């Protein structure tokens, strides 16, 4: 069965454990907390022994059957954890997991740790067999818009609260790094008594531990959040992100905006373009908003500017452009985010450019 991570606590409180629990996702903190809750429920139900199998590389899948059937002299029930970091067990592993799911014992509580699976792996026979034999929990990433509510719930656990403004500030500081967020929230619980936290208290206590992925940048750019897009770019640059990869991600979105404008001008439904480009859910709405925000001549110019940034990144000079490709990329990002009307600029000096006559 499918089980939402938010419903796990109430499910475990009922006292009837499934034989198998699969936790799949790309949010390490939430996945580990889910496993901790299941382990605690298992220990309370008498599963006193624990064994962990790391099924990576050339794993011998016969160990799975052996581990499930072997109990120590002092335990009658055990927790068996199968960690599959690659998310793809291969043909032999898939068959082993299917057979294991069909014969799962009541005396073994099985936990399967998986990364976020692609569509092929999620629809595989072995995944379906595990889900049918127990509970499958997909752990979703906590997006920026969801962070204030997530933080409010976490603070409530330690009998603290904060205003919307304070929660928004805290969300900016910890975005994309929930493991560090947990530490920062615990710090607030140690520093301040129960009750409402002020913005000044949080500002003084919390460090900037935000972490971003490359594709957070084009998403913020399409959403029209110029300030956040610039912050993401600066954080990625400071962390050593590869400029060619960032430029590729940004230029793909710039070209997509231009294609969307051309489709709209030709009277084609944007949904058709979305299918052709195999857009991720919600991207068509962001593209439509960006296509309306950015003038068509500006979009065409930005495509050319991406090509110029590519030349700058290779050490070639481009007339009337800064020699720092990062600054030029920042301006492209901000122009898409604001439709070319942004007043936000990179906090760095620019080289003198020829003045127009």
Image (cartoon, helix red, strand yellow):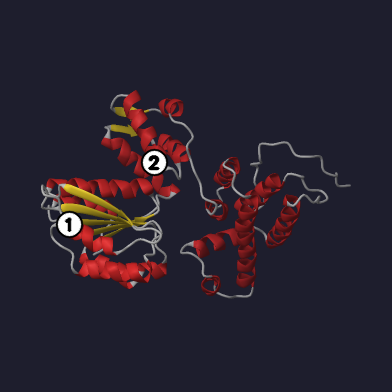
Picture residue at 28% right of the left edge, 67% below the top = 97
Picture residue at 67% right of the left edge, 51% below the top = 332
Q: Which residue is mark 2?
A: 179
Label 1 crowd bin: few (<14), some (14–19), many (20+), radius 10 Å = few
Measuring from the top left, give residue 96's x and y in whole percent: 28, 68
Picture residue at 21% right of the left edge, 63% below the top = 134
Please, what secondary structure does the residue beneath circle 1 have?
A: loop
Nearest to N terminus: mark 1 or mark 2? 1
- Examine the rendering and report whether any part of residue 292 can be seen: no
Question: Alpha carbon of mark 1 to alpha carbon of mark 2: how far?
Answer: 35 Å
Q: Which residue is mark 1?
A: 70
**Above-or-below relation of 309 to 237:** below
Q: Quadrant of residue 269?
A: bottom right
Please tell me which residue lies in front, 355 or 325.
Answer: 325
Name the front one of labels 1 and 2. 1
Disc 1 to disc 2: CB gap under 8 Å: no
**Left or right of 141, for residue 267:** right
Measuring from the top left, give residue 63's x and y in whole percent: 27, 60
Please tell me which residue lies in front, 246 or 66.
Answer: 66
Q: Quadrant of residue 301?
A: bottom right
**Left or right of 293, for residue 210:** left
Measuring from the top left, give residue 293's x and y in whole percent: 61, 57
Which of the image's four quarters has the N terminus? bottom left
Please, what secondary structure does the residue beneath circle 2 have?
A: helix
């Amino acid at each position: 069965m499918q089980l939402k991570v938010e419903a796990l606590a109430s499910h475990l409180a009922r006292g009837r454990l499934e034989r198998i629990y699969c936790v799949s996702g790309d949010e390490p903190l939430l996945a580990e907390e889910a496993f901790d809750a299941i382990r605690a429920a298992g220990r309370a139900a008498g599963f006193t022994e624990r064994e962990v199998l790391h099924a990576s590389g050339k794993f011998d899948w016969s160990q799975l059957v052996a581990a499930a059937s072997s109990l120590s002299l002092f335990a009658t029930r055990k927790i068996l954890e199968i960690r599959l970091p690659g998310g793809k067990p291969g043909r032999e592993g898939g068959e082993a997991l299917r057979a294991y799911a069909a014969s799962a014992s009541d005396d073994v509580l099985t936990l399967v740790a998986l990364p976020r699976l692609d569509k092929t792996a999620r629809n595989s026979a072995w995944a379906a067999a595990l889900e049918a034999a127990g509970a499958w929990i997909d752990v979703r990433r906590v997006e920026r818009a969801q962070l204030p509510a997530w933080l409010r719930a976490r603070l409530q656990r330690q009998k603290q609260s904060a205003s919307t403004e304070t929660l928004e500030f805290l969300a900016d500081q910890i975005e994309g790094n929930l493991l560090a967020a947990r530490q920062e929230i615990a710090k607030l619980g140690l520093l301040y008594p129960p009750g409402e936290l002020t913005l000044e208290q949080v500002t003084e206590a919390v460090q900037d531990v935000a972490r971003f992925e490359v594709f957070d940048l084009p998403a913020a750019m399409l959403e029209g959040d110029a300030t956040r897009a610039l912050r993401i770019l600066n954080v990625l640059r400071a962390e050593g992100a590869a400029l060619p990869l960032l430029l590729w991600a940004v230029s793909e979105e710039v070209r997509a905006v231009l294609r969307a404008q051309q489709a709209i001008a030709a009277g084609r439904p944007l949904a058709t373009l979305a299918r052709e480009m195999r857009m991720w859910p919600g991207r068509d709405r962001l593209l439509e908003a960006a296509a309306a925000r950015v003038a068509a001549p500006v979009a065409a110019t930005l495509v050319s500017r991406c090509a110029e940034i590519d030349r700058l990144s290779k050490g070639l000079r481009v007339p009337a452009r800064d020699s720092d490709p990062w600054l030029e990329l920042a301006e492209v990002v901000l122009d898409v985010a604001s439709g070319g009307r942004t007043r936000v600029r990179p906090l760095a000096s620019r080289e003198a450019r020829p003045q127009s006559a």
